[in-house]
C-alpha cells in the first residue's frame, strides 16, 4: 500500500474515532479556546476568560459529556480561581464556584465533580520558614448536579492533590512535613477520610491516574535518584513497583489493565505500553513524548513533544501504530477523549 493510500485509510478511521478535547490560546491572551480535534478535523467548542499564560486546568467526565475547568484571572491563584462547568454537546459554560484552588478538578457524570479550596493558611513562626506560611488547610469539596458545593473533608498540609475517583471514593495525595500519603475521602460522607499508604520516597509522587481498582503513579525509589512506576491497590492499600526507569521520568498514564510510559531509547525516546509484567514499544521519537490522555480501551494516546519555543500536540493510534500531529502551540491543556455527534 502506498503512502497516499495509508493516509486515506488513516483519515477514514479517524472519522469514526472519538474527539480529543483541549484548550489553547484564543484571539487574545486573556481568552482560552476549548477545541475538539482528531486527525484532519478540528471544531471549536467554546471559550473561557483566563489570566495570560495560565491555561485552564481541565477534567473530562468518564461519560464524555461534561468538562470541568479551573481558571485563574486574579493575582493569587491559590485563592482567586474560578470553577466552570461546560456541557460539551452545546459548549455552554457555567460559572459554578469562585475562590477555588487553581488546580485540576475531577469531573463526574451528570455534571458533578470534585475540587479543592484553600480554607486557611498557617502563619510561619519567626525564622522557621522561607515562606510566609508553614502550611494550609485545604478542603475537598463536591459539586452536585444542581451546582451546589459541599465540604467532604479538610487536610492540614503543605500541598494537596486530587489523584482520582474509585467508586464512591476520592483519592487525594497529601504532603505534610512528616510524610506524603494517599487518603480516601467518601463522596457520600459515609466514612471519615482513611489513610491508604505513604509514598516510598517522600513528596515526589506525580502523574496520578486511576484504572480499575489501582492508582498508577511515578515516584523516586527510596534512598535513590532512580525513577519507577508504582501501583497502589485501592482495595487493600498495597504498593508495588510496576517498572523501573532509572534516571528517566516515566510519566505514566493508565487505562484498564495497561499503562503507557516514557523511556529513553536508542536515538531518542520511546513510548511504551505495559501490563505491569511485560512492556511493548509503541512509538520511537527524537522528542520527549509526554502522554496526556488515553482512551478507555487504551488504543488512542494524546501526547506532547516540546520544541524550543512551542509544543506539539500529537495523536497516536496504537492499533494502527500511526502518529498524527494535530497542532503546534505555545500553550495547551488536554482534557481527554470524548464521543461527540
Image (spheres, rainbow, N blue to C red):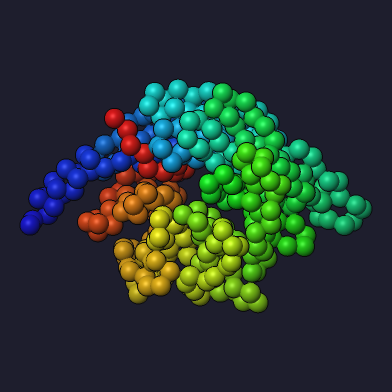
Q: Residue furthest left?
A: 1
Instruction: Pick the quarter of the image with the C terminus.
Output: top left
Residue 268 in view of the camera: no
* 23 relative to 18 in the view: left or right: right
| Image point (59%, 38%), residue name | 114
Q: Residue furthest front?
A: 190
| Image point (9%, 50%), residue name | 5
- Rendering quarter of residue 15: top left
Q: Position of residue 327 (x, y in %)?
A: 34, 43
Q: Position of residue 19 (x, y in %)?
A: 33, 39
Q: Position of residue 40 (x, y in %)?
A: 24, 40
| Image point (14%, 48%), residue name | 9
- Rendering quarter of residue 299: bottom left
| Image point (26%, 42%), residue name | 17
Instruction: Pick the quarter of the image with the N terminus.
Output: bottom left
Q: Nearer the viewer, residue 172 or 285?
A: 172
Residue 259 in view of the camera: yes
Q: Is residue 3 above or below residue 339?
A: below
Amino acid at each position: 500500500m502506498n503512502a497516499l493510500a495509508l493516509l486515506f485509510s488513516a483519515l477514514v478511521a479517524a472519522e469514526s474515532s472519538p474527539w480529543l478535547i483541549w484548550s489553547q490560546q484564543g484571539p487574545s491572551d486573556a481568552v482560552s479556546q476549548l477545541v475538539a480535534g482528531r486527525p484532519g478535523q478540528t471544531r471549536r467548542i467554546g471559550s473561557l476568560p483566563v489570566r495570560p499564560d495560565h491555561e485552564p486546568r481541565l477534567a473530562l467526565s468518564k461519560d464524555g459529556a461534561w468538562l470541568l475547568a479551573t481558571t485563574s484571572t486574579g493575582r493569587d491563584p491559590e485563592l482567586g480561581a474560578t470553577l466552570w462547568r461546560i456541557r460539551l454537546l452545546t459548549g455552554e459554560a457555567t460559572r459554578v464556584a469562585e475562590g477555588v484552588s487553581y488546580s485540576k478538578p475531577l469531573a463526574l457524570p451528570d455534571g458533578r465533580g470534585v475540587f479543592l479550596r484553600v480554607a486557611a493558611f498557617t502563619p510561619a513562626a519567626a525564622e522557621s520558614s522561607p515562606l510566609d506560611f508553614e502550611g494550609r488547610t485545604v478542603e475537598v469539596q463536591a459539586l452536585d448536579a444542581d451546582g451546589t458545593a459541599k465540604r467532604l473533608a479538610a487536610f492540614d498540609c503543605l500541598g494537596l492533590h486530587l489523584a482520582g475517583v474509585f467508586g464512591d471514593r476520592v483519592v487525594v495525595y497529601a504532603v505534610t512535613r512528616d510524610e506524603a500519603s494517599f487518603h480516601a475521602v467518601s463522596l457520600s460522607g459515609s466514612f471519615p477520610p482513611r489513610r491508604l499508604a505513604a509514598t516510598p520516597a517522600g513528596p515526589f509522587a506525580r502523574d496520578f491516574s486511576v484504572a480499575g481498582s489501582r492508582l498508577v503513579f511515578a515516584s523516586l525509589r527510596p534512598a535513590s535518584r532512580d525513577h519507577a512506576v508504582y501501583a497502589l491497590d485501592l482495595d487493600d492499600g498495597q504498593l508495588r513497583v510496576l517498572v523501573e526507569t532509572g534516571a528517566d521520568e516515566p510519566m505514566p498514564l493508565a487505562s484498564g489493565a495497561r499503562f503507557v510510559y516514557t523511556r529513553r531509547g536508542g536515538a531518542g525516546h520511546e513510548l511504551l505500553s505495559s501490563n505491569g509484567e511485560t512492556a511493548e514499544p509503541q512509538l520511537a521519537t527524537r522528542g520527549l513524548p509526554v502522554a496526556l490522555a488515553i482512551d478507555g480501551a487504551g488504543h488512542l494516546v494524546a501526547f506532547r513533544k516540546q520544541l524550543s519555543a512551542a509544543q506539539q500536540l500529537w495523536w497516536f493510534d496504537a492499533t494502527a501504530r500511526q502518529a498524527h500531529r494535530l497542532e503546534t502551540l505555545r500553550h495547551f491543556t488536554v482534557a481527554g477523549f470524548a464521543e461527540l455527534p
